[in-house]
Image (cartoon, grey):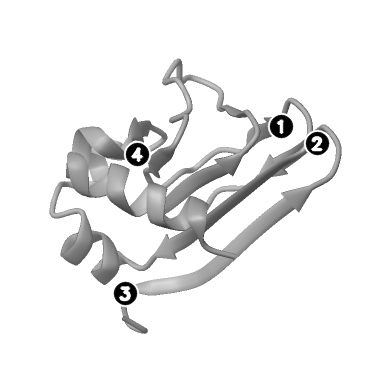
């Protein structure tokens, strides 16, 4: 998986959080607990409530948690996007998609597994 993933990450916040997401390659993110939103100029896409596919971006976004929360994710290299998403990155640029729309029930199973792990 090393050539496909830029990094794995997790964010745990005990309180409400507001931060910036700077331009980056595509990501897959999972909300484990809490409510998270992402606002990006020019986009009206809702943030996925469980799993989300974030396309590559060229603009900064604001991420917020409504209170305590935990999210985990993985950044995708260009090869990772081509292998794991198998759709045009251009069509997903600056967009957020519910992961279930891309992977169907597999996304829901992965989310459930992540929620029960430590």
Could you classify mark 2 by the number of other residues whose Cα lies within 10 Å: few (under 14), some (14-19), or many (20 or more)?
some
Point out which mark residue 57 bears.
Answer: none
Residue drawn 37% across and 44% down? 55
Check disc 3 and report the residue beneath it.
4
Check disc 4 and report the residue beneath it.
93
Q: CA distance from mark 1 to mark 2?
A: 5 Å
> Marks 4 and 3: CB-CB under 8 Å?
no
Q: Quadrant of residue 82 in the image? A: bottom left
Please state which of the two labelled residues, at mark 2 or mark 4, is closer to the viewer.
2
Q: Residue 102, relative to residue 39: is it above or below?
A: below
Q: Earlier in the sequence, mark 3 or mark 1?
A: 3
Give the x, y percent position of residue 19.
76, 40
Q: CA distance from mark 4 to mark 1?
A: 23 Å
Q: Earlier in the sequence, mark 4 or mark 1?
A: 1
Point out which mark residue 17 bears.
Answer: 2
Could you classify mark 4 by the number of other residues whose Cα lies within 10 Å: few (under 14), some (14-19), or many (20 or more)?
some
Please state which of the two labelled residues, at mark 4 or mark 3, is closer to the viewer.
3
Check disc 1 and report the residue beneath it.
65
Tally of marks: 4
Q: CA distance from mark 3 to mark 1?
A: 28 Å
Q: Earlier in the sequence, mark 2 or mark 4?
A: 2
Q: CA distance from mark 2 to mark 4?
A: 25 Å
> Marks 1 and 2: CB-CB under 8 Å?
yes
Please state which of the two labelled residues, at mark 4 or mark 1, is closer to the viewer.
1
**Taking 35 as reference, is 89 left or right?**
left
Q: Secondary structure at mark 3?
A: loop
């Amino acid at each position: 998986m090393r050539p496909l993933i830029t990094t794995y990450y997790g964010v745990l916040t005990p309180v409400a959080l507001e931060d910036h997401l700077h331009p980056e390659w595509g990501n897959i993110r999972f909300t484990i607990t809490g409510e998270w939103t992402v606002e990006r100029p020019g986009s009206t896409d809702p943030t996925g409530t469980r799993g989300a596919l974030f396309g590559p971006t060229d603009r900064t976004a604001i991420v917020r948690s409504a209170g305590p929360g935990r999210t985990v994710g993985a950044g995708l290299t260009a090869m990772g996007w081509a292998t794991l998403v198998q759709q045009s990155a251009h069509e997903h640029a600056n967009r957020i998609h519910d992961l279930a729309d891309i992977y169907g029930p597999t996304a829901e199973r992965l989310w459930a597994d992540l929620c029960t792990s430590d």
